[in-house]
Image: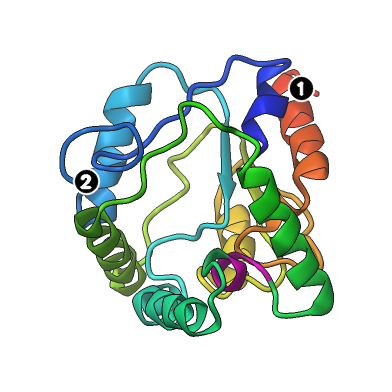
Amino acid sequence: MSAPRHAARRRVIAFDNRGVGASGGSTPDTIETMARDAVLFIRRLVRKVILAGTGPAGGPGIDKVTALTLRDILKGFLTRKDPKQFLFFTDTEHGRREAHAFLERLKERTDRRDKAISLRSFRAQPKAIHRWGLQPPADLSRIRQPVLVANGESDRTVPSENTLDLAARLPQGELVPLYPDAGHGGIFQFHDEFVARALAFLEARPDA
């Protein structure tokens, strides 16, 4: 939901992986293949990077994403609630209120909406993330661009400790203080604060 706010001041290109949203093809089942697709798309364009709700290869708990996702989807089915409430937000009064607000904001866009994810893509993505969590750590010291890293303090999907590790291992990593009482959807929950921080990061001069 932050894209329209970014678009007011920056050119925004929304990129979907193969087989997801408006992109054709089949969704890869490894992070490396997804990354190669992204590299082909953005080569020679990247000056700065913003990473949200993610972690490095081999990060603790990342390999549990499949079981957690299936459990939350089943919970959503049994309670007749959108599983995004459980996947992205904390199970507190505040978290549930923020989840409801987020789900309502999703209804604001009525035209050119993303297609529902296919079963094939749904199966490929958790498989890729599971493998990513089992791999040995990668050398991130070669990434020389400034990188802004953000997440909620209680991310269950990609445990928040991975966000701290990611920012620390990037030579020019800049950590947004973890959003309180927020999970994997921290930037959705704190969208106003995140957009302001992201725009300031993108617009800052290299020597600032």
Q: Secondary structure at mark 2?
A: helix
Closest to the observer, 155 or 75: 75
Residue 25 in picture, x, y percent from top left: 16, 37
The residue tagged 1 is 204
Closest to the observer, 154 or 175: 154
Residue 12 in picture, x, y percent from top left: 56, 21
Residue 83 in picture, x, y percent from top left: 52, 70
Residue 67 in picture, x, y percent from top left: 37, 82
Q: Quadrant of residue 197?
A: top right
CA distance for labels 2 and 1: 32 Å
Residue at figure coordinates x 51%, y 34% from the top left: 144
Q: Image quadrant for the C terminus?
A: top right
Is 130 colored magenta in this rendering?
Answer: no
In the rendered view, does 68 fall on the left or right side of 86?
A: left
Is 86 colored magenta in this rendering?
Answer: yes
Prevalent SS, magenta region:
helix
